[in-house]
Image: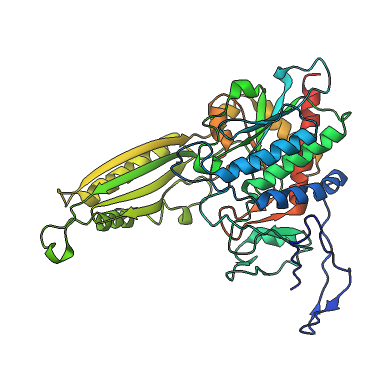
C-alpha cells in the first residue's frame, strides 16, 4: 500500500511517477495508481485553492459546545469567522462582516446594474465542527492517488478500511485528505466553507462570468442545532439559498429528518451506601434501566436505515441522587416522530413505576422539521441545483438526509434551502475524510449554479 502524507506544505500534492516501484524499506513491489480525473477543467483549476483553504480552515479549532450560553458557543468559531471576513474583503466583497452573534455575511455584488435583491441567491456553510470527537490540534494529511486499500493513519491505530467504508472503493486514484487519526478532520463543514470561498474567489476574479448577485453566509453552532436560530433572513435578502454541507459527489438533498431532543431527569434518594438498606433510590440505576428498556432492534440508529426513524440516547450523566438522559429522536414523518417521543416518555415512566420515591421530569425540545414540505412548493430551487450538478458532468443523487442542516430550519423559517454535496465522508468521527477531486467538483458546481440562476429570469 502506498500512502503519501503531506502536511507541511499546504496545497502540495506529491504524485506517483506513473510506473511501478519497490518500497525501499521492504523491497515489496508497489503498483502505481493512475491519478483520478477531475469532473471538469474548471474543477481542476479550482482544486489548488480549495485544498489550501481547506487545510488552513481545518487547523482552527471550531468545535461547538452543547448547552451553549452565548452565540457562538466557542471562541474558535470567531477566529475562523474573522479569517473569512478578511479573505472575503481581499476578494473585493467590501460588505463582509462578522456580526455580534458569530455569523459571517458578504455579497458578491450584481453583475448587471438592473439586478435586484429579488434575484440574489444565497450560499451557506457552517463554521463549527461536531463536539462528538476531539477537534483540537487537527493536522490535515494528503494521501495522493489513493490505491484503494486500507489507509493507516499515524495515531491511535485509526484506519480507513474499504470493507467498512464501501464509498472508499470508488475513490481509487483520488487525493484523499484525512486528519491524523486522533481528531476530527473538520470536513463537516469546512469542505463546504472552502468550496464556497474558492468559487467566490474564482467568480470575483472573472467578473464577466454570468451570475446573479450572490450572498454568502457562514453560520455558527450548526452541529448543536443552533445555526439558524439567530439568522436574519430578511437582512440576508435572497430568493433562495443552498447549504454546501452534503457528502457524496452529486448529492442533492431536499429532504431531511424531522428532529426533537428529549431530556429525562430522574431524581433519586441518596444516602451513605453503608446505611442504604431500604432507603437508597439510585437515580443512575434507574436511568440505566430506562436506556436498557428502549427498543434496540427497531428504533436505534445502528439498526435502522433509509426512511426509518430512531431514538438515540447520546448522553447519560449523574449521581445516585440525580441522573440525566439526553436523547435525540428522528423521523422523516412528523406523526411518526411524535409517536417515537411518546414511546420514549412511556418507557421512562414504566421503568420508574416500581419506585414511587423517584421523580421524573421530561423536557421535549423541537429542533427542526423535514424541509421537504417547504421545498416542494418551489421546485425550481432544487431544479436549478440539479441542472448545475449536471452541467458539471455529474449525475445527481437524490437522497434524503438522515440528519439535518441549517437548511432544515431556514426552509421552515421561509427561506428555501436545499443541500449540495462537499465530497466529505465519515462525519463526526476521527475517520473523517474528503476527496480533493470531489471538493473541487463542489466548488465548480457552485460556479455552475450561479450561471444557471443568471438565465432564470431572462
Residue drawn at the location 65% of the way across and 43% of the way down = 80
Q: Is residue 201 left or right of residue 183?
A: right
Q: Give the percent coordinates (x, y) of residue 26.
A: 76, 84
The residue that appears at 85% across and 28% down in the rendered structure is 210
Q: Is residue 219 visible?
A: yes
Q: Quadrant of the N terminus?
A: bottom right
The residue positioned 83% from the left and 34% from the top of the image is 203
Q: Residue 274 sits in which quadrant?
A: bottom left
Residue 437 spot, x, y in % from top left: 78, 52
**In this rendering, position of residue 72 left or right of residue 172:** left
Which residue of the protein is positioned furthest toward the top in this rendering?
A: 114
Task: Spot the residue most to the bottom.
Answer: 27
Question: Toward which corner of the image does residue 7 lie, by quadrant?
Answer: bottom right
- Residues 302 and 268: in front is 268
Would residue 422 appear left or right of 339 to someone viewing this image?
A: right
Which residue appears farthest toward the left when viewing the image? 278
State how the image is colored: rainbow
Residue 293: x and y in percent read 30, 55
* Above or below 398: residue 436: below
User: Which quadrant of the figure has residue 236?
Assistant: top right
Quadrant of the image for the C terminus? top right
Report the number of numbered marks: 0
Q: Is residue 340 visible?
A: no
433 lies above or below 257: below
Q: Position of residue 322 (x, y in %)?
A: 26, 51
Nearer to the camera, 335 or 324:
324
Amino acid at each position: 500500500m502506498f500512502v503519501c502524507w503531506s502536511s507541511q506544505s499546504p496545497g502540495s500534492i506529491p504524485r506517483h511517477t506513473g510506473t511501478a516501484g519497490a518500497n525501499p524499506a521492504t523491497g515489496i513491489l508497489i503498483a502505481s495508481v493512475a491519478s483520478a480525473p477531475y469532473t471538469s477543467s474548471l474543477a481542476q483549476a479550482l482544486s489548488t485553492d480549495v485544498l489550501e483553504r481547506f487545510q488552513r480552515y481545518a487547523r482552527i479549532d471550531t468545535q461547538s459546545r452543547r448547552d451553549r450560553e452565548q452565540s457562538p458557543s466557542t471562541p474558535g468559531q470567531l477566529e475562523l469567522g474573522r479569517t473569512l471576513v478578511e479573505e472575503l474583503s481581499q476578494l473585493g466583497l467590501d460588505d463582509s462582516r462578522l456580526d455580534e452573534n458569530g455569523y459571517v455575511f458578504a455579497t458578491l455584488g450584481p453583475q448587471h446594474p438592473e439586478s435586484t435583491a429579488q434575484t440574489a441567491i444565497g450560499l451557506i456553510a457552517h463554521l463549527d465542527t461536531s463536539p462528538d470527537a476531539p477537534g483540537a490540534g487537527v493536522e490535515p494529511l494528503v494521501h495522493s492517488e489513493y490505491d484503494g486499500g486500507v489507509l493507516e493513519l499515524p495515531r491511535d491505530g485509526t484506519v480507513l478500511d474499504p470493507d467498512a467504508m464501501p464509498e472508499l472503493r470508488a475513490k481509487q486514484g483520488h487525493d484523499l485528505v484525512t486528519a491524523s487519526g486522533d481528531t476530527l478532520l473538520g470536513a463537516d463543514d469546512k469542505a463546504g466553507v472552502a468550496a464556497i470561498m474558492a468559487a467566490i474567489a474564482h467568480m470575483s476574479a472573472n467578473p464577466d462570468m454570468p451570475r446573479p448577485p450572490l450572498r454568502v453566509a457562514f453560520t455558527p453552532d450548526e452541529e448543536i442545532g443552533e445555526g439558524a436560530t439567530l439568522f436574519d433572513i430578511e437582512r440576508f435578502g435572497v430568493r433562495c439559498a443552498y447549504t454546501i454541507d452534503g457528502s457524496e459527489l452529486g448529492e442533492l438533498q431536499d429532504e431531511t429528518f424531522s428532529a426533537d431532543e428529549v431530556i429525562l431527569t430522574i431524581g433519586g434518594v441518596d444516602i451513605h451506601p453503608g446505611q442504604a438498606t431500604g432507603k437508597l433510590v439510585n437515580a443512575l440505576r434507574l436511568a440505566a434501566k430506562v436506556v436498557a428498556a428502549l427498543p434496540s432492534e427497531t428504533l436505534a440508529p445502528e439498526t435502522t436505515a433509509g426512511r426509518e426513524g430512531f431514538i438515540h440516547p447520546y448522553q447519560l450523566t449523574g449521581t445516585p441522587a440525580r441522573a440525566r438522559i439526553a436523547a435525540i429522536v428522528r423521523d422523516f414523518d412528523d406523526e411518526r416522530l411524535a409517536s417515537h417521543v411518546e414511546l420514549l416518555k412511556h418507557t421512562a415512566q414504566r421503568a420508574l413505576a416500581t419506585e414511587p420515591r423517584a421523580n421524573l421530569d421530561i423536557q421535549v425540545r423541537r429542533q427542526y422539521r423535514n424541509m421537504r414540505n417547504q421545498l416542494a412548493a418551489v421546485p425550481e430551487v432544487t431544479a436549478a441545483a440539479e441542472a448545475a450538478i449536471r452541467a458539471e458532468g455529474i449525475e445527481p443523487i437524490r437522497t434524503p438526509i438522515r440528519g439535518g442542516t441549517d437548511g432544515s430550519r431556514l426552509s421552515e423559517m421561509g427561506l428555501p434551502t436545499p443541500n449540495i454535496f462537499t465530497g466529505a465522508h465519515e462525519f463526526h468521527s476521527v475517520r473523517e475524510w474528503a476527496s480533493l477531486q470531489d471538493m473541487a467538483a463542489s466548488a465548480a458546481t457552485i460556479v455552475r449554479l450561479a450561471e444557471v440562476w443568471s438565465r432564470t429570469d431572462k
